[in-house]
Image: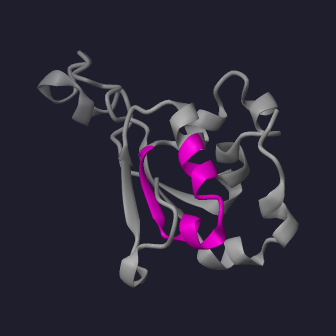
Amino acid sequence: RHSSPAPGGGSVLFFMPHCGRALYSNLVQHNWRPASLASMLVLGNSFAALSGDPGAERAAAWSPLFRALPLASESPIGVPAGSAATSRGGGSGEPLFANAFNNTSLHAFDDDALRALPEGWWERSFEP
């Protein structure tokens, strides 16, 4: 649990490849303060891809991860599945771990955007 900004004003990197949506939601909920979110970097599954999962529309109403989506920047770093870099023989079409890290992204939260939100926004319940 990361409960306060990193010492010295730095960032904390959470390495979370292949984790489920619930774990990302728990991480965001336990750090649901502008200063804590702004000091977090999350290297893991694409938040955008997680938002397209079945049940995402319903989860958007209560899930910390879905509330945080518009506040986070996402920089993809994985190799897209089916590209030549993920195939044996330089593009022969035979997959070689093609989907292992294809939606890995680095996520960061913008401190100014977080602090610009009204105080009541941070106090809304996460209960469904």
Asked whether 103 or 36 is in front, the reply is: 36
69 on left or right of 82: right
Q: What's the residue at 56%, 33% (across, down)?
A: 21
Bounds of the magenta span? 26-44
Badge count: 0
Which residue is situated farthest in the bottom direction here? Answer: 8
**Residue 116 pos. (x, y %):** 76, 77
Asked whether 68 or 101 is in front, the reply is: 68
**Residue 69 pos. (x, y %):** 66, 51
Task: Reply yes or no: does residue 40 show up in magenta.
Answer: yes
Asked whether 54 or 15 is in front, the reply is: 15
Q: What's the residue at 65%, 31% (across, down)?
A: 52
**Residue 83 pos. (x, y %):** 32, 32
Q: What's the residue at 51%, 37% (across, down)?
A: 23
Task: Give the quarter of the image for residue 42.
Answer: bottom left
47 on left or right of 126: left
54 on left or right of 18: right
Task: Give the quarter of the image for residue 62.
Answer: top right
